Amino acid sequence: MNFLEERIVKDGVVKSGNVLKVDSFLNHQMDIALMEEIGREFKRRFGSKKVDKVMTIEASGIGIAAFVAKEFGVPLVFAKKSKSINIDGDMFVAEVESFTHKNKNQVIVSKRFLHENEHILIIDDFLANGCALQGLISIAESAGAVVEGCGIVIEKGFQIGGRVIRNMGYHVESLAIVDAMDAESGTITFREQ
Ligand code: 5GP
């Protein structure tokens, strides 16, 4: 088991509805030493790529992506969830269905912060059905930016997102892939990588 899988086994909680709670160390309270290690691991995995900017989606991606951006020495831009229907032409927009809240949000990135031919590394905490990643990819591509890859902290391999995004031709690296989890017993099975 790698450092993250060990931590998930120790402190993760399997909830019903295919939800894994990691809020004691990743997306509510954050273990900063672990974040640093995650940042270094993504740098190791994507270090041979040209990365001009890291991109994520609010809220839980931001903390993680910040450590990745620091490793690469580049800015981080995060897509904002927007309720406004009057989005002007200064924004790139995508519609994203939330896995955890089951609602749809428009997510926006200002055209000031994403440019043609910029090389982007997308980072997020979880990959489930792939809606968040697809939204971020669509925003990057409408800007004419180049998506170098997607770095995911925890992929739920029994949901379709990983397959969909890889089949689209994108390089996805997940630090832990959960192949099965059971809310009753609390057991979590990881994919050998
Ligand atoms: P997707 O868009 O791939 O269906 O879901 C990814 C997004 O939903 C992530 O940004 C993450 O915030 C949230 N998410 C999906 N599955 C889980 C989960 O099991 N636990 C937590 N905490 N968040 C999840």
Image (cartoon, rainbow, N blue to C red):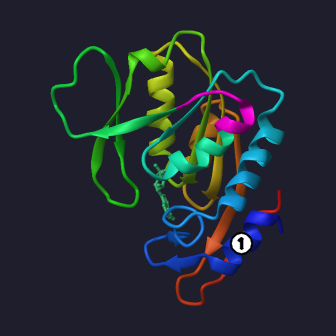
- For this rendering, which residue is in front, 84 or 177? 84
Residue at the image point whose x is 42% and y is 35% from the top: 79
Magenta residues, as a range? 69-76
Q: In this figure, which residue is indicated by the disc labeled 1? A: 7
Q: Position of residue 128 (x, y in %)?
A: 52, 55
As for residue 15 lying within the magenta part, the answer is: no
Residue at the image point whose x is 43% and y is 50% from the top: 59
Q: Neighbour class for label 1 at 10 Å: few (<14), some, many (≥20)?
A: some
Q: Position of residue 138 (x, y in %)?
A: 46, 27
Tell me: residue 140, above or below residue 121. above
Q: Is residue 173 left or right of residue 137?
A: right
Which image quadrant is residue 171 in?
A: top right
Tell me: residue 27, above or below residue 184. above
- For this rendering, which residue is in front, 182 or 94? 94
Looking at numbered disc 1 in the image, what kind of residue is underneath it? Arg
Q: Position of residue 15 (x, y in %)?
A: 48, 78
Tell me: residue 166, above or below residue 158. above
Residue at the image point whose x is 83% and y is 56% from the top: 193
